[in-house]
């Protein structure tokens, strides 16, 4: 796995453990079709998009854990808000780890229902939670065909102005 994807994976694990109290495990691409897609795009030293594809059960558990409510109390708006917050935190953490002195413009996170399988585009990471059927796929795509971020970033104190 290239360095950029390792950094993204670290960001995903940290956000899910701290915000949602969920411990993800890398899995082979799952047969579970996602119900939600949350996306955020960024521009700066390159540019790109982070897309989260979430199964219904995982999106519900994320909202349940984040809001400290029962599963039957979670509604669609709460699941979508939670997914938007997740993609925002993952992208922000990822960019900070990639280039601490960089300056990036992020879009407002978007989220909505999705039908069909996850597309085979961009760099892909797949996760599950224990023996549950919950699944998540993360895609990272860049506007230049790569990740859209610096692989190493500048040395501390040598930030760039955009």
Image (cartoon, rainbow, N blue to C red):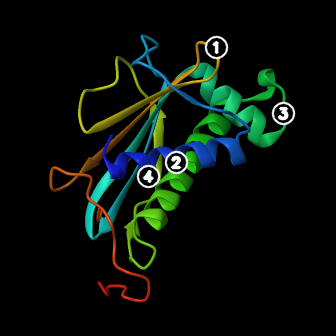
In the image, residue 33 sits, relative to residue 80, either above or below, namely above
Q: CA distance from mark 4 to mark 1?
A: 25 Å
Q: CA distance from mark 4 to mark 3?
A: 31 Å
Disc 3 is placed on an element classified as: loop
Cα distance, mark 3 to mark 1?
A: 20 Å
Residue at 52% of width from left, 59% of height from top?
Answer: 93
Q: Position of residue 37 (x, y in %)?
A: 44, 34
Q: Secondary structure at mark 4?
A: helix
Measuring 38% from the left and 71% from the top, which residue is drawn there? 104
- Would you name the residue on which mark 3 appears? 69
Q: Nearer the viewer, mark 2 or mark 1?
A: 2
Q: Which mark is residue 132?
A: 1
Residue bearing the label numbered 2: 10
Q: Quadrant of residue 99?
A: bottom left
In the picture, measured across the screen, residue 78 lies left or right of residue 88, that is right
In the image: residue 76, left or right of residue 111:
right
How packed mark 2 is, by other alpha carbons closer than 10 Å (few <14, some 14-19, many 20 or more), is some
Residue mark closest to the camera, 4 vs 3:
4
Of labels 3 and 2, earlier in sequence is 2
Vertical comparison of 136 with 84: above or below: above
| Residue 98 occupies quadrant | bottom left
Q: In front: mark 3 or mark 1?
A: 1
The mark lying in front, picked from 4 and 1, is 4
Q: Are marks 3 and 2 in contact (CB under 8 Å)?
A: no
Res. 7 mark: 4
Q: Name the N-terminal-most of marks 3 and 1.
A: 3
- CB atoms at circles 4 and 2 under 8 Å apart? yes
Label annotation for residue 72: none
First in sequence: mark 2 vs mark 1: 2
For marks 3 and 2, give the one nearer the viewer: 2
Q: Residue at x 29, y 61 (%)?
A: 151
């Amino acid at each position: 796995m290239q360095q950029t994807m390792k950094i993204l994976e670290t960001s995903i694990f940290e956000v899910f453990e701290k915000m949602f109290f969920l411990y993800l495990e890398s899995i082979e691409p799952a047969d579970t079709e996602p119900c939600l897609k949350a996306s955020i795009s960024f521009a700066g030293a390159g540019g790109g998009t982070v897309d989260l594809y979430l199964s219904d059960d995982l999106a519900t558990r994320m909202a349940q854990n984040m809001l400290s409510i029962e599963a039957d109390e979670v509604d669609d708006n709460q699941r979508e808000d939670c997914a938007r917050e997740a993609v925002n935190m993952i992208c922000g953490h990822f960019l900070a780890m990639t280039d601490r002195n960089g300056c990036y413009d992020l879009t407002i996170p978007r989220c909505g229902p999705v039908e069909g399988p996850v597309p085979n585009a961009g760099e892909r990471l797949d996760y599950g939670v224990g023996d549950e059927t919950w699944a998540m796929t993360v895609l990272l795509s860049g506007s230049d065909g790569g990740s859209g971020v610096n692989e190493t970033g500048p040395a501390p104190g040598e930030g760039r102005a955009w």
